[in-house]
Image (cartoon, coloured by chain):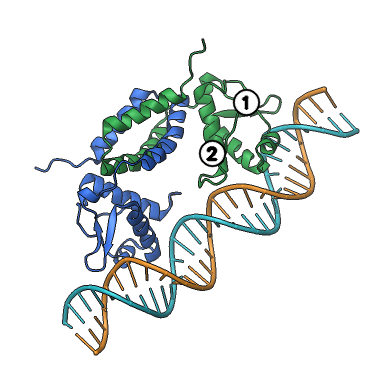
Chain colours: A blue, B green, C cyan, D orange
Amino acid sequence: MMIELDLQSEIPIYTQLMDQIIEGIASGRLEPGESLPSVRSLASDIGINLHTVNKAYTLLKQEGFIQVHRKKGVIVVQKEEMPQVTEHYLAKLGQQLRPVVAESLCRGLNQEQLTEIIARLYNDIQPQDKE
Amino acid sequence: MMIELDLQSEIPIYTQLMDQIIEGIASGRLEPGESLPSVRSLASDIGINLHTVNKAYTLLKQEGFIQVHRKKGVIVVQKEEMPQVTEHYLAKLGQQLRPVVAESLCRGLNQEQLTEIIARLYNDIQPQDKE
DNA sequence: CATCTGTTATACATATAATATAACAGATAT
DNA sequence: ATATCTGTTATATTATATGTATAACAGATG
């Protein structure tokens, strides 16, 4: 699993890590049941502190994307255990997208154009057919 | 202009202020040329420090949504001067929406459903016809 | 002339982010 | 069994972001 970080970004490193792992799952590059590197080895690989990796793992665990077994280590949850579309998630989504839509309206980016951007992101991230 | 702040939110006050003013413009409740309250009076009204309001105003000015005249005070820019859809804005939008789409894919919220949420926000915010 | 304006400077308190070092208990492999 | 690797927890330090507080300046207003 390739991890690309922007250490100059205003987005916290642990957030970038979470985003990349979630996108890895969404794209199929990380499959359910697959194990993630240990906090120490991943931290060492990308040159950051182990606590930063641990924070990302802990939050991903809290949100239900990964599990930690004493034996198997850190693994991506099975498809049936994957977090669903809850009311809480929909509420968070609305609050997050509201300012985005408002600014789009101000700048004259209409609904169809924003929808097209969303569509492109779906196609960009979604698992591609192999061979 | 009604301002509603959540002082318990993890979203900075100056960001909430910017969001509400931009949504005010998007909804038509704030019209081009309309003047905004002074940093001191707005700060006093909502019970926060004047520097917090000043930071929001300064950033909104930098992004091109408002102007500051020595005479007229702080005003919403004219329609022709409103920030447009620039390459820089589209890039920011993509980076912002990418993690949103990735998590949607993981949770099984498909493209049509997310598009529907966007549509609802557009209708929610957009200026309503007056009689 | 007094008052209001945005703006700037300085200082302080608090919270978050990231790093550093250390230790503990369970699991693994030599 | 012993050394190593695992996630986890604790403590400390540094840097940055946020929000507040007080003060001052120059332009505009009545």
Q: Position of residue B67 (x, y in %)?
A: 61, 28
Query: Which element type, helix, strand or loop, lies under badge 2?
Result: helix
> Left or right of A84: which side holds C22?
right
Observer-nearest of A25 and A80: A80
Q: Position of residue B129 (x, y in %)?
A: 48, 13
Residue at 67 percent across and 43 percent down: it is B49
Question: Mark 2–mark 1 contact, CB under 8 Å?
Answer: no
The reply to the same-chain question for discs 2 and 1 is: yes
Q: Position of residue B35 (x, y in %)?
A: 64, 24
Which residue is the extreme one toward the top? B131
Which residue is the extreme one toward the front? A87
Q: What is the number of callouts on the image?
A: 2
Q: Image quarter for residue B84?
A: top left
Query: Which element type, helix, strand or loop, lies under badge 1?
Result: strand
Residue designated by label 2: B16
**Residue A108 in view of the camera:** no
Q: Which mark is residue A107?
A: none
Answer few, some or many: residues within 10 Å of disc 1's Cα (few below 14, many 20 plus, some between 14 and 19).
many
Observer-nearest of C19 and B17: B17
Q: Position of residue B5 (x, y in %)?
A: 57, 39
Residue at 67 percent across and 34 percent down: it is B42
Residue at 29 percent across and 54 percent down: it is A3
Chain letter of the residue beneath label 2 in the structure image: B
The quadrant of the picture occupied by the N terminus of chain A is: bottom left
Which kind of residue does numbered mark 1 sit on? Ile
> Left or right of A118: which side holds B60?
right
Which residue is the extreme one toward the left? A131
Does label 2 or label 1 sit earlier along the sequence?
A: 2
Residue designated by label 1: B75
The quadrant of the picture occupied by the C terminus of chain A is: top left
**Residue A41 in view of the camera:** yes
